[in-house]
Amino acid sequence: MAAVVHRLRGLLADWLAALGAWRLGCAVFTALLLGWAGPQLAAIRHPRLDERLLDGVHRLIPEPLGNLLLRVYQMSGVHLTAVLVLAVLIFLSLKRLWPELVCLMVGTGGILVIVDRWLKPLFDRRRPSGRLLEDISGRSFPSGHAAGSVVFYFLTCCLLTAHYPRLRRPLFVFSSCWVALVWLSTLYCRAHWLSDIAAGAAVGYVWLSFCLAGFTVWEQRCRPSSPPSPHG
């Protein structure tokens, strides 16, 4: 039993070292901010600043671009994202990159549980009124679109570019543009308040950091001759 405890302490120490003080501080700050702001935002039926921002988005975006954003929001939903996740998992399995496969499964599955099963029921915040799509339902804080897109796209980029460094720039540029477009579409559809998206992005970044830190520990302990860790 003592040996198991000692090993767990060693793993935790290595994980914290891989995470780093800055990312750990970001995680603590995010947790404190969610705990403080979440209940207050949920209690406000019509948040003035959030409503003004949503109205401003609709005034600034022309109708043709708005129609495109509606399609983007629909494309970024659970069904298409599940297909993309499955495609990347198949690719990783074909390349026999088993640790990367496990990391991606934990990352994408974990953020769904954290946001949809824990945080949204905990805060129980209403979505904005006047939604432009009929199939938008459920609670809004934090945004699952924001959190999930950060974790899936950037975790995939980190894992793949560790083996294919020449793809680093195009993958990260494409992912950044697509994630930004998903966030904008979420606002345009009135599926979320801006504060929902900010909270979702923060939660997604923290979980992404946790997953990459865990993967780094795996690299250090089990694959000492492997390519450089994607966490660095």
Image (spheres, grey):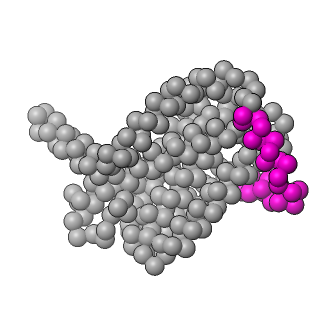
Q: Is residue 163 visible?
A: yes
Residue drawn at the location 45% of the way across and 55% of the way down = 104
- Magenta stretch holds residue 151: no
Q: Quadrant of residue 48?
A: top right
Residue drawn at the location 72% of the way across and 29% of the way down = 47
Q: Quadrant of the C terminus?
A: bottom left
Q: Position of residue 221 (x, y in %)?
A: 21, 57
Q: Residue furthest right?
A: 63
With respect to residue 31, does 60 lie above or below? Answer: below
- Magenta stretch holds residue 70: yes
With respect to residue 226, does 193 lie above or below? Answer: above
Q: Quadrant of the N terminus?
A: top left
Q: How many marks?
A: 0
Left or right of 195: which side holds 115? left
Q: Is residue 89 visible?
A: no
Q: Position of residue 73 (x, y in %)?
A: 73, 52
Left or right of 17: which side holds 149? right
Q: Which residues are magenta?
A: 49-76
Q: Position of residue 175 (x, y in %)?
A: 58, 63
Q: Residue furthest left?
A: 2
Left or right of 140: which side holds 51? right
Q: Nearer the viewer, residue 131 or 30?
A: 30
Residue drawn at the location 33% of the way across and 49% of the way down = 19
Residue drawn at the location 77% of the way across and 41% of the way down = 54
Q: Main secondary structure of the magenta part?
A: helix
With respect to residue 170, does 207 lie above or below? Answer: above
